[in-house]
Image (spheres, grey):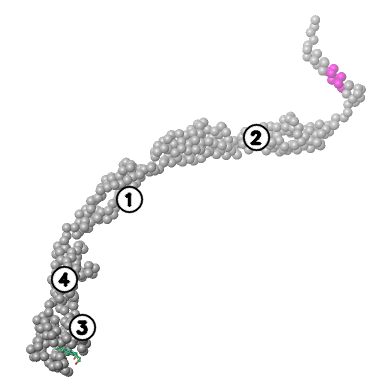
Amino acid sequence: MKKIPALTIITSTLILITIFLACSKGGGGTNPPPDPCSGVTVVVNGSAVNPTTTGGNNGSISATATGGSGITYSINGGTFQSSGNFTGLTAGTYTISAKTSSGCTGSKSFTLTDPANPCAGITINVTATTTNPSAPGASDGSITASATGSSGFTYSKDGTNFQASGTFSNLTAGSYTITAKDANGCTGSANFTLTDPNPCSGVTISVTGTTSNPSAPGASDGSITANATGSTGFTYSKDGTNFQASGTFSNLTAGSYTITAKDANGCTGSASFTLTDPNPCAGVTVAVTTNITNNTPCLTANGSVMAMATGGLAPYTFSKDGVNFQSSATFNSLAAGNYTITAKDANSCVGTTGAVVGNLPAGPLFSAVQSMMQTNCAPCHNNTIQNGGMNWTIDCNIVTFKDRIKARAVDANPSSMPPTGLLPLSERQKIIDWINAGGKFTD
Ligand code: HEC
């Protein structure tokens, strides 16, 4: 039996079906209706916007068709929609089809391309958390960077060697530029600074010391030996600028000194020390002696004290009130009384002594007159009866008014005293002798 090829059978069948369908359409035997799209040309126009980034999906096509009404649009054979705008497109070639309400169609291809520079529009930001070294000079700092703005990042801290992790460890203090690179080689970078901790935080440096005062006032042989604690590797300074390994400072005069100690990290502490000159008066005894001249009563005060000082450093100055000092050792015009004489030497070391200025005693001639007058005159010239304003019970009145006494009791001028008549010559002679001798209390 001769075989009939299968293809021949299928082809024949299709032809038969087509003939059948053509004959049954339109109620058999009549001509088919005219094609509504005959002579109709649907033209698609439009514009495309490329993705702004490589691989980006923000490309778009905006299509408009002419040639009919009720036009709907489809992209790549998809569902028709009323809008000719298609967004969210990646790079590629797209066919936009337009269909009128009559089913007439047209189409146009649009090609969207990625930007020539794959990094255009890409902004990669690098942020990081940093951990500073735990101690000055330590290499245990770290930076953990992360990047945004793209994907597929690798990270580098030298711009050359990239790693998947954004974490860089074992870092010393310093400034680091961390670069992040995305899958397209686009990069972004940022600087991060790791700082050593303050080496002096928590460090308290105490300075103590011993001092040796200058051996004499103004001498420059004092010294300070300072010692610091609280850290190590100290150097010392007494001016805060020049440091030396030793804590000993010599050849110092009296004064106040601030000694600063600085450790190996530059952390400092300081303390003040005061050197004092020795007391120049220690062991010095200024002795004061005086020559006293007593006062003569009934005259302007004329006592005097002449002082002499020994035991201190000349020159001395002298004072009788402890306040006002004079170079002269002699004090004149002193009334009787108790005085304290102070001598001060060149170092202001002082010594004092008491000086008693007395009154000179009455002289014999005065005493004779005074005695005679107490007997002969005082009864009419005393504290209650003062004839002519005279009170002869006060010795100095006798001295002061001696001329009047002579006038009245010796010369009876203008009349005698006592009023009853002159005293015997022997009594009057006492007045004459005293006045001739000078008429003072001490004569
Ligand atoms: C009995 C009383 C009496 C006796 C004592 C007496 N007088 Fe007088 N004296 C007077 C009377 C009163 C006056 C005032 C009247 C006069 O100045 O005459 C006076 C005044 C004075 C005067 C002041 C007047 C003058 O001239 O400055 C002197 C001085 C004086 N008598 C000295 C003496 C002497 C010195 C004696 C002793 C030697 C003395 N009298 C004894 C009564 C007395």
Image x and y of residue 443, in percent: 11, 82
Q: Is residue 12 above or below residue 244?
A: above
Kind of residue at disc 2: Asn
Quarter-of-image position of residue 290: bottom left
The residue wearing badge 1 is: 240
Q: Which residues are magenta?
A: 15-22
Q: Is residue 40 left or right of residue 173?
A: right
- Say which residue appears at 17% left-offset and 94% top-offset: 414
Disc 1 within 8 angstroms of ligand 1 (CB): no
What number is the disc on residue 57? 2
Q: In the image, what residue type sits under mark 4?
A: Val
Query: Looking at the image, which residue sits at the far left?
Result: 426
Question: In this rendering, would 251 be left or right of 56?
Answer: left
3D distance between C-alphas at marks 1 and 4: 60 Å
Indicate which disc, 1 or 3, sits on the residue closer to the N terminus.
Answer: 1
Disc assigned to residue 383: 3
Q: Are marks 2 and 3 in contact (CB under 8 Å)?
A: no
Residue 185 screen position, x and y as percent: 55, 34
In the rendering, at what x and y percent does residue 70 appear? 80, 36
Residue shown at the point (17%, 68%) measured from the top left:
354
Q: Gap in Å between the C-alphas at discs 1 and 3?
A: 84 Å
Mark 2 vs mark 3, CA separation in Å: 140 Å
Residue at 10% of width from left, 89% of height from top? 428
